[in-house]
Amino acid sequence: MQENQNQNQKQKYTLSILIENEFGALSRVAGLFSARGYNIESLTVAPTEDESLSRMTIVTSCSEFVLEQITKQLNKLVDVVKVINLTDTAHVGRELMLIKIRALAKDREELKRTCDIFRGKIVDVSENSYIMELTGNPQKLDAFIAAIPQSLILETARTGICGIGRAERILKI
């Protein structure tokens, strides 16, 4: 009974997928998730050092049983070369956020200090706003947003997690 309960509990998983850099490959992976009613919380994809391959990082919340099904289905896709679950192994995962903040004269210095505390960079300055760039885990980016008065936040754009295994854990063919 306990084992069955564990199979139904949702957890957040980070999958790293090596995929052929071909037309429609991303669409087929996304289609696999949507056709089966699985949610993608974040998805990043870009070519690797081998221009014939791309690397995808997908974050999804599901049960362990569903994760097994997702992994099996991904491995059946012709374009997929390799799939690894980064969740329970040593890995580095980072997200990029660009955030546009109303920066009037009275707030500018405090906003700069807050950006520095979170090791961010101001990448654009206008008369009434800053655009800041921050990288880190999602909790760090959420904490930065919480540290800024909500009335000053004009716009945010986030990439989703990009992850890679640590040490000898390598995703290559």
Image (cartoon, rainbow, N blue to C red):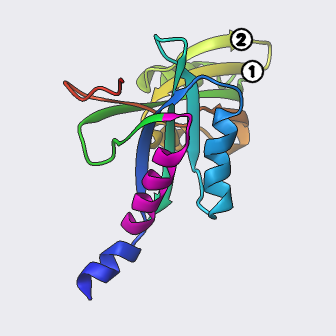
x and y percent of residue 87 in the render? 33, 47
Please report the residue visible at 20 percent of the width from the left and 24 percent of the height from the top. Answer: 167
- Around disc 1, counting alpha carbons within 10 Å, would you say few (fewer than 14), some (14 to 19), or many (20 or more)? some
Q: How many marks?
A: 2
Quarter of the picture containing the N terminus is bottom left
Which element type, helix, strand or loop, lies under badge 1?
Answer: strand
Residue extending furthest right? Answer: 127
Q: Main secondary structure of the magenta part?
A: helix
Res. 29 image quadrant: top right
- Residue 125's disc is 2
Judge whether 6 appears above or below 97 on screen. Answer: below
Res. 100 image quadrant: top right
**In magenta segment, residue 18:** no
**In magenta segment, residue 71:** yes
x and y percent of residue 90 in the render? 23, 37
Please report the residue visible at 63 percent of the width from the left and 64 percent of the height from the top. Answer: 37
- Residue 129's disc is 1
Residue extending furthest bottom? Answer: 1
Quarter of the picture containing the C terminus is top left
Please report the residue visible at 43 percent of the width from the left and 52 percent of the height from the top. Answer: 71
Question: Does the CB distance between marks 1 and 2 fall below 8 Å?
Answer: yes
Residue 1 visible from this viewpoint? yes
- The residues tagged by marks 1 and 2 sit, at their Cα atoms, a distance apart of 6 Å
Question: Which residues fall within the magenta stretch?
Answer: 63-80
Q: In the shown orientation, is residue 1 left or right of residue 94?
A: left
Which element type, helix, strand or loop, lies under badge 2?
Answer: strand
x and y percent of residue 142 in the render? 51, 43
The amino acid at mark 2 is Val
Residue 105 visible from this viewpoint? no
- Around disc 2, counting alpha carbons within 10 Å, would you say few (fewer than 14), some (14 to 19), or many (20 or more)? few
Q: In the shown orientation, is residue 71 left or right of residue 88?
A: right
